[in-house]
Amino acid sequence: MSVPQLPFLPLSILEARAEAVLRRALEAGVWNGRWPVPVDAIAEILLGLTIELGDLTHEFGTLDSVGEGELLGAIDFGERTIWIDQSLDPDKYSERLSRYLFTLAHEIAHWILHAALYGARSSKVRLAADVLTASIQCRGVGGQSLTASRRPRVEFQADAWAGFFLMPRATTVALAQELGASAGDMSVFVRELARISEASPQAARIRIAHLGGAVYGTLKRQPDLFSAA
């Protein structure tokens, strides 16, 4: 069985799709427009998805095409269920909260972006680093996502969408303006954005890079973004 071709989606479209879900959450009273974005509530209440924690390697097996790293998340479109590996349980491992939230947002992205393409498929097909049995399984390396250059398109799209979702444009730009009015520089912005959004510093750096000129002009000092502490 042939694998359906994923369309190319520019970052502007991925961001618009994330903002559309956030608007729905705001209108439904699931989100109040403030930090942090209530990822669990949006998944369960707004989108009607179930979140399950479990041993994903035991549940789904290994992904031979990847061969390394941790199997952290999966989504079963037919069952409307997101699986998160028990190693990310935020009630037990609070230090991994940012990874839990990003993984959950990443799986929500698959629901928003890819359910129409894969949701009705019941036969097993192989797509780059993923095995889909009406599902997508996602793997990270060393607790971080694989770099975009190694990620298949389906995973790159979900990574980008997750960053837009966790760090909405309006609130992120407002934070940059607030910091720029005081002692703002890039390293301070990275740390504060990660803290307030409950994202990782790496995810915060990538989000800032996507915003580019919308935030750079508000900051007094702008060292190399990816060397910011």
Image (cartoon, grey):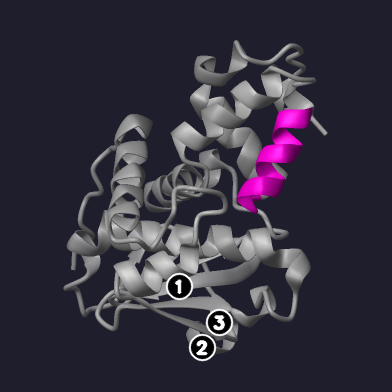
**Disc 3 versus disc 1: distance between alpha carbons?**
8 Å
Q: In this figure, which residue is indicated by the disc labeled 2?
A: 59
Does 113 sit left or right of 56 as displayed?
A: left
Labels 2 and 1 touching (C-beta < 8 A): yes
Q: Can see residue 129?
A: no
Residue at 47% over, 50% down: 162
| Of the pair 179 and 84, the residue shown nearer to us | 179
Q: Around disc 1, counting alpha carbons within 10 Å, would you say few (fewer than 14), some (14 to 19), or many (20 or more)?
A: many
Q: In this figure, which residue is indicated by the disc labeled 1?
A: 74
Labels 3 and 2 touching (C-beta < 8 A): yes
Expressed as whole percent of the image width and height from the top left, the position of residue 174 reads 55, 29
Residue type highlighted by circle 3: Leu
Residue type highlighted by circle 2: Glu
What's the mark number on residue 56? Answer: 3
Q: Can see residue 84?
A: yes
Upstream in the sequence, badge 2 or badge 1?
2
| Magenta span main SS | helix
Dot 3 falls on a residue whose secondary structure is helix
Tell me, yes or no, whether the highlighted magenta stretch contains residue 25. Answer: no
Which region is colored magenta?
Answer: 188-199
Looking at the image, residue 198 lies above or below residue 185: below
